[in-house]
Image (cartoon, grey):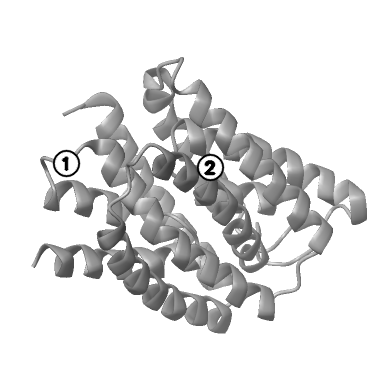
Amino acid sequence: MDLVVVAVASGLAGFVDAVVGGGGLVLVPALFATYPNAVPATLFGTNKGGAIWGTAWAAVQFARRVTLARLTMAWGMAGALAGSFGGAYVVTLVSAGPLKRALPFVLLAILLYTVAKKQLGREHTPRHVGSAEARVAGVIGLAIGFYDGFFGPGTGSFFVFLFVRVLGYDFLHASAAAKMLNTATNLAALILFAATGHVWWHVAAVLAVANVAGSLMGTRLALARGAGFVRIVFIVVVSALILKTAYDGFFPH
């Protein structure tokens, strides 16, 4: 029964993650509720072991339908991978407490900016080309990758917002790019968790199948409905992230 519960949660997480990111909002709490006595690191590792497949699947599906510059994605993914490893190392030395309390305010600023700028991300008008765009993507990947390794919540939303605001992508292209970079950060985290034995592979395998199924539905819907739909889901997910991170930051369990 436990596997059924987390599989359903993983499918829903895959759907949300495929559209705009934020699937961890669904799957991580479900894992903690279902396995309350498990070591947190093991649940986080198991989450990554299942979620990475849905993210990677969505990245491939988006890449087939949405044109993204290969050099830009290569630099972005390399930066994300390196940043995630760096963040994971730093979190062993420094407390993430202050960041946890600041996060809801950062997300609120992003939400208000997105709502105020009604045309933001509706049209795909890249501001850079070639190696210039690739370098900016690399910096975005490094910065948000570091954040993902150090703390994590809202990584996909940060990727989407920065690709829209800094690089001039529409929400559909930004979501496609975010899947590529998020796959890299998830891979870094999974390697670290697996190396320390913090992955339940039998549970992760079930989560992976459900996550890919949800990801397939989410990807198809995002591609069919376009940037306007992705923008709406982005606003909803960021709003949920604000509530969740505010609760976690100021009312710790």
Mark 1 neighbour class, 10 Å CA radius: few under 14, some 14 to 19, many 20 or more: few
| Residue 200, image x, y percentages | 27, 52
Q: Nearer the viewer, residue 48 or 158?
A: 48
Q: Residue at x 50, y 61 (%)?
A: 20
Mark 2 neighbour class, 10 Å CA radius: few under 14, some 14 to 19, many 20 or more: some
Circle 2 — which element?
A: helix
Q: Nearer the viewer, residue 57 or 157?
A: 57
| Residue 157, image x, y percentages | 51, 50
Circle 1 — which element?
A: loop
Q: Is residue 153 visible to the viewer in this orientation of the structure? A: no
Q: Is residue 174 left or right of residue 54?
A: right
Residue 110: mark in rendering = 2
- The N terminus lies in which quarter of the figure? bottom left
- The C terminus lies in which quarter of the figure? top left
Q: Residue at x 83, y 57 (%)?
A: 71
Q: Is residue 200 above or below residue 81?
A: below
- Which residue carries the number 1 mark? 38
Q: Is residue 182 above or below residue 149?
A: below
Q: Is residue 139 left or right of residue 175?
A: right
The disc, 1 or 2, on the residue closer to the chain's N-terminal end is 1
Q: Is residue 189 above or below residue 118?
A: above
Distance from Cα at disc 1 to Cα at disc 2 = 34 Å
| Residue 6, image x, y percentages | 21, 62
Q: Nearer the viewer, residue 189 or 61?
A: 189
| Discs 1/2, front | 1
Q: Is residue 126 above or below residue 77?
A: below
Q: Residue furthest left?
A: 1
Q: Is residue 136 left or right of residue 25?
A: right
Q: Is residue 29 visible to the viewer in this orientation of the structure? A: yes
Residue 21: mark in rendering = none
